[in-house]
Amino acid sequence: MPVATPMGAVDLLRLRREHVDRLAATSGAAGEIAAATVALTWIPRPKGADLKRLIATLADEGIEIQGSAFDFIAVPEGVVVDLKQTDSIRAALPRLTFIEVKTANSARVLPGFKNFFFALTEKEILASDALGSQHVVVLFNRATEEMLYTSVQAILSQSRSSNWQVSVQL
Protein backbone atom coordinates (compact mmCIF):
# COMPACT_ATOMS: atom_id res chain seq x y z
CA MET A 1 0.00 0.00 0.00
CA PRO A 2 1.49 3.36 -0.96
CA VAL A 3 1.94 5.96 1.73
CA ALA A 4 0.79 9.50 1.03
CA THR A 5 3.80 11.53 -0.11
CA PRO A 6 4.60 14.69 1.80
CA MET A 7 3.59 17.94 0.15
CA GLY A 8 5.96 20.88 0.54
CA ALA A 9 8.00 18.92 3.05
CA VAL A 10 11.07 21.12 3.18
CA ASP A 11 9.17 24.40 3.48
CA LEU A 12 6.76 23.05 6.07
CA LEU A 13 9.57 21.55 8.09
CA ARG A 14 11.53 24.81 8.13
CA LEU A 15 8.47 26.75 9.30
CA ARG A 16 7.72 24.30 12.08
CA ARG A 17 11.21 23.44 13.29
CA GLU A 18 11.19 25.82 16.26
CA HIS A 19 7.71 24.76 17.26
CA VAL A 20 8.61 21.08 17.06
CA ASP A 21 11.75 21.56 19.15
CA ARG A 22 9.71 23.19 21.92
CA LEU A 23 7.18 20.34 21.95
CA ALA A 24 9.62 17.44 21.99
CA ALA A 25 10.96 15.99 25.22
CA THR A 26 13.65 13.83 23.57
CA SER A 27 15.53 13.83 20.29
CA GLY A 28 13.71 10.68 19.11
CA ALA A 29 10.33 12.21 19.85
CA ALA A 30 11.42 15.43 18.16
CA GLY A 31 12.27 13.51 15.01
CA GLU A 32 8.95 11.69 15.05
CA ILE A 33 7.05 14.95 15.48
CA ALA A 34 9.10 16.67 12.77
CA ALA A 35 8.50 13.80 10.35
CA ALA A 36 4.77 13.89 11.05
CA THR A 37 4.57 17.59 10.25
CA VAL A 38 5.56 16.86 6.66
CA ALA A 39 3.19 13.94 6.23
CA LEU A 40 -0.21 15.49 6.68
CA THR A 41 -2.20 12.26 6.58
CA TRP A 42 -0.41 10.68 9.54
CA ILE A 43 -2.10 10.30 12.88
CA PRO A 44 -0.11 9.56 16.04
CA ARG A 45 -0.27 6.08 17.55
CA PRO A 46 -3.47 6.06 19.61
CA LYS A 47 -3.33 5.71 23.36
CA GLY A 48 -5.34 3.96 26.02
CA ALA A 49 -8.64 2.37 25.02
CA ASP A 50 -8.27 3.45 21.37
CA LEU A 51 -4.94 1.63 21.07
CA LYS A 52 -6.35 -1.47 22.76
CA ARG A 53 -9.32 -1.43 20.39
CA LEU A 54 -7.03 -1.08 17.34
CA ILE A 55 -4.74 -3.92 18.49
CA ALA A 56 -7.76 -6.13 19.26
CA THR A 57 -9.26 -5.43 15.82
CA LEU A 58 -5.96 -6.31 14.18
CA ALA A 59 -5.86 -9.54 16.22
CA ASP A 60 -9.42 -10.37 15.11
CA GLU A 61 -8.13 -10.09 11.53
CA GLY A 62 -5.23 -12.45 12.30
CA ILE A 63 -2.59 -9.72 12.67
CA GLU A 64 -0.73 -9.89 15.97
CA ILE A 65 1.37 -6.82 16.81
CA GLN A 66 2.28 -4.84 19.91
CA GLY A 67 1.07 -1.29 20.35
CA SER A 68 4.63 -0.01 20.68
CA ALA A 69 5.63 -1.42 17.26
CA PHE A 70 4.72 1.75 15.34
CA ASP A 71 4.69 5.52 15.80
CA PHE A 72 2.02 6.71 13.36
CA ILE A 73 -0.75 5.49 11.10
CA ALA A 74 -1.07 6.85 7.58
CA VAL A 75 -4.69 7.33 6.63
CA PRO A 76 -5.21 7.95 2.91
CA GLU A 77 -7.22 10.98 1.84
CA GLY A 78 -10.89 10.17 1.76
CA VAL A 79 -10.61 7.38 4.32
CA VAL A 80 -12.26 8.04 7.65
CA VAL A 81 -11.40 5.96 10.68
CA ASP A 82 -12.95 6.43 14.11
CA LEU A 83 -10.65 4.71 16.59
CA LYS A 84 -13.49 4.58 19.10
CA GLN A 85 -15.53 2.29 16.82
CA THR A 86 -14.38 -1.26 16.03
CA ASP A 87 -16.49 -1.38 12.85
CA SER A 88 -14.85 1.81 11.58
CA ILE A 89 -11.36 0.43 12.29
CA ARG A 90 -12.22 -2.86 10.59
CA ALA A 91 -13.55 -1.07 7.48
CA ALA A 92 -10.50 1.20 7.19
CA LEU A 93 -7.88 -1.39 8.16
CA PRO A 94 -6.97 -2.60 4.63
CA ARG A 95 -6.11 1.00 3.66
CA LEU A 96 -4.08 1.96 6.74
CA THR A 97 -0.28 1.96 6.83
CA PHE A 98 1.58 1.61 10.11
CA ILE A 99 4.71 3.77 10.28
CA GLU A 100 7.83 3.45 12.39
CA VAL A 101 10.04 6.57 12.35
CA LYS A 102 13.80 6.40 12.83
CA THR A 103 15.50 9.77 13.17
CA ALA A 104 19.03 11.02 12.73
CA ASN A 105 20.41 14.39 13.73
CA SER A 106 24.05 14.05 12.84
CA ALA A 107 26.36 15.37 10.15
CA ARG A 108 27.96 11.91 9.88
CA VAL A 109 24.77 10.58 8.28
CA LEU A 110 25.36 10.97 4.55
CA PRO A 111 22.73 11.35 1.80
CA GLY A 112 20.71 8.20 1.33
CA PHE A 113 21.22 7.52 5.06
CA LYS A 114 24.69 6.03 4.59
CA ASN A 115 26.38 5.74 8.02
CA PHE A 116 23.01 5.89 9.81
CA PHE A 117 23.17 3.61 12.86
CA PHE A 118 19.89 2.81 14.62
CA ALA A 119 18.06 -0.02 16.31
CA LEU A 120 15.12 -2.09 15.15
CA THR A 121 13.26 -3.68 18.03
CA GLU A 122 11.92 -7.20 18.00
CA LYS A 123 8.40 -5.73 18.14
CA GLU A 124 9.07 -3.60 15.04
CA ILE A 125 10.48 -6.55 13.10
CA LEU A 126 7.54 -8.77 14.05
CA ALA A 127 5.04 -6.02 13.16
CA SER A 128 6.69 -5.60 9.78
CA ASP A 129 6.35 -9.33 9.16
CA ALA A 130 2.71 -9.42 10.32
CA LEU A 131 1.61 -6.28 8.44
CA GLY A 132 3.63 -6.79 5.25
CA SER A 133 3.25 -3.85 2.88
CA GLN A 134 1.09 -2.08 5.45
CA HIS A 135 4.20 -1.44 7.58
CA VAL A 136 6.67 1.27 6.56
CA VAL A 137 9.84 2.55 8.16
CA VAL A 138 10.51 6.23 7.58
CA LEU A 139 14.10 7.34 7.99
CA PHE A 140 14.26 11.06 8.76
CA ASN A 141 17.40 13.18 9.09
CA ARG A 142 16.60 16.32 11.06
CA ALA A 143 19.99 17.82 10.17
CA THR A 144 19.38 17.67 6.39
CA GLU A 145 15.60 17.25 6.29
CA GLU A 146 16.00 14.14 4.12
CA MET A 147 13.22 11.56 4.41
CA LEU A 148 13.19 8.02 3.03
CA TYR A 149 10.27 5.59 3.02
CA THR A 150 11.52 2.00 3.28
CA SER A 151 10.82 -1.33 4.98
CA VAL A 152 12.43 -3.51 7.61
CA GLN A 153 13.24 -6.07 4.91
CA ALA A 154 14.94 -3.45 2.71
CA ILE A 155 16.91 -2.12 5.69
CA LEU A 156 18.12 -5.58 6.69
CA SER A 157 19.07 -6.48 3.12
CA GLN A 158 21.09 -3.26 2.70
CA SER A 159 22.74 -3.13 6.11
CA ARG A 160 26.52 -3.25 6.19
CA SER A 161 26.55 -4.63 9.71
CA SER A 162 24.23 -5.62 12.48
CA ASN A 163 24.65 -6.21 16.17
CA TRP A 164 21.95 -8.24 17.91
CA GLN A 165 21.43 -7.53 21.59
CA VAL A 166 19.06 -8.12 24.43
CA SER A 167 17.85 -5.06 26.33
CA VAL A 168 16.77 -5.52 29.92
CA GLN A 169 15.37 -3.35 32.66
CA LEU A 170 16.08 -4.19 36.29
Image: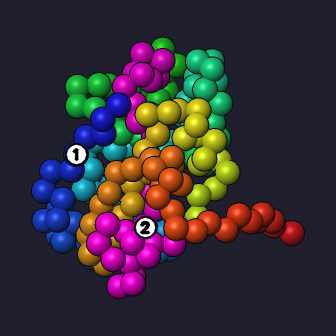
Residue 129, quarter of picture = top right
Residue 135 at x, y percent in the picture: 46, 39
Q: Residue at x 49, y 27 (%)?
A: 84
Quadrant where the C terminus is found in the figure = bottom right
Position of residue 44 in the picture relative to residue 12 (left or right): right
Q: Residue at x 29, y 25 (%)?
A: 79
Q: Callout 1: few (<14), some (14-19), or many (20+) C-alpha neighbours within 10 Å?
A: few
What are the residue bounds of the magenta stretch? 89-118
| Residue 52 seen anywhere in this rendered image of the structure | no
- Whether tag 2 and tag 1 are in contact, CB under 8 A, the answer is no
Q: Is residue 157 magenta?
A: no
Position of residue 142 in the picture relative to residue 54 (left or right): left
Residue 167 at x, y percent in the picture: 76, 65
Could you say whether the residue bearing mark 2 is in a helix, strand or loop?
Answer: strand
Q: Callout 2: few (<14), some (14-19), or many (20+) C-alpha neighbours within 10 Å?
A: many
Of 103 and 24, nearer the camera is 103
- Residue bearing the label numbered 2: 103
Mark positioned earlier in the residue sequence (2 or 1): 1
Amino acid on which the number 1 mark rests in the picture:
Thr
Residue 1 at x, y percent in the picture: 35, 31
Q: Residue at x 81, y 67 (%)?
A: 169
Position of residue 17 in the picture relative to residue 149 (left or right): left
- Residue bearing the label numbered 1: 5
Could you say whether the residue bearing mark 1 is in a helix, strand or loop?
Answer: loop
Of 157 and 163, nearer the camera is 157
Amino acid on which the number 2 mark rests in the picture:
Thr
Of 90 and 161, nearer the camera is 161
Residue 62, quarter of picture = top right
Q: Residue at x 52, y 67 (%)?
A: 160
| Residue 120 seen anywhere in this rendered image of the structure | yes
Classify 106 as above or below 54.
below
